[in-house]
Image (cartoon, rainbow, N blue to C red):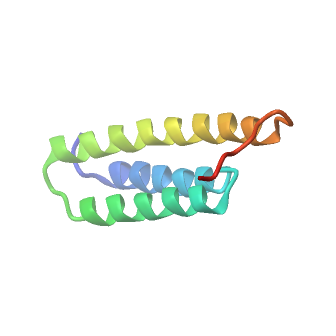
């Protein structure tokens, strides 16, 4: 996938979706972790020029988005469960 305007648009779209997905996490700590990780990874790959590396980063971001959304849904349900207890030791 050559570094075109479409590639940049896809990367920016995934970036925004990851930041929105972070806000679905049930706790501020988890939200901040996803936001920080997303920003760090995007800044690190911002200046890539190799087509294969760019394609790999976009696929990684897409997979990360799926993971964040699944975790957000699962953890939100878990936190709402009255039988769920957190042991802090």
Q: Would you identify the image quadrant in which residue 72 lies?
A: top right
The image shows residue 28 at horizontal and vertical percentages of: 65, 62
Q: Quadrant of residue 30?
A: bottom right
19 or 82, nearer to the observer: 82
Residue at point 50% right, 56% down?
A: 34
> Which quadrant is the N terminus positioned in?
top left
- Residue 61 in percent (x, y) is at 39, 44
Answer above or below: position of 60 versus 44: above
Position of 57 with respect to 76 (left or right) is left
Which residue is rendered at x = 13% and y = 50% of the image?
A: 50
Residue found at the far left of this picture: 50
Number of marks in picture: 0
Q: Nearer the viewer, residue 82 or 28?
A: 82
Q: Residue at x 52, y 51 (%)?
A: 18
Q: Is residue 51 left or right of residue 15?
A: left
In this view, the residue in front, 84 or 3, is 84
- Spot occupied by residue 59 in the image (x, y as percentages of width and height): 34, 37
Horizontal side of residue 70 vs 64, given as left or right: right
In x, y percent, where is residue 3? Answer: 24, 51
Residue located farthest toward the right when viewing the structure as drawn: 82
89 w.r.t. 85: above or below: below
The residue under the point 55% across, 64% down is 32
């Amino acid at each position: 996938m050559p570094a075109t305007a479409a590639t940049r648009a896809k990367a920016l779209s995934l970036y925004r979706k990851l930041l929105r997905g972070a806000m679905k996490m049930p706790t501020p700590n988890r939200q901040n972790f996803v936001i920080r990780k997303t920003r760090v990874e995007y800044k690190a790959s911002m200046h890539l020029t190799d087509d294969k590396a760019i394609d790999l980063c976009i696929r990684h971001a897409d997979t990360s988005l799926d993971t964040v959304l699944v975790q957000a849904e699962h953890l939100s349900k878990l936190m709402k469960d009255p039988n769920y207890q957190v042991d802090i030791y």
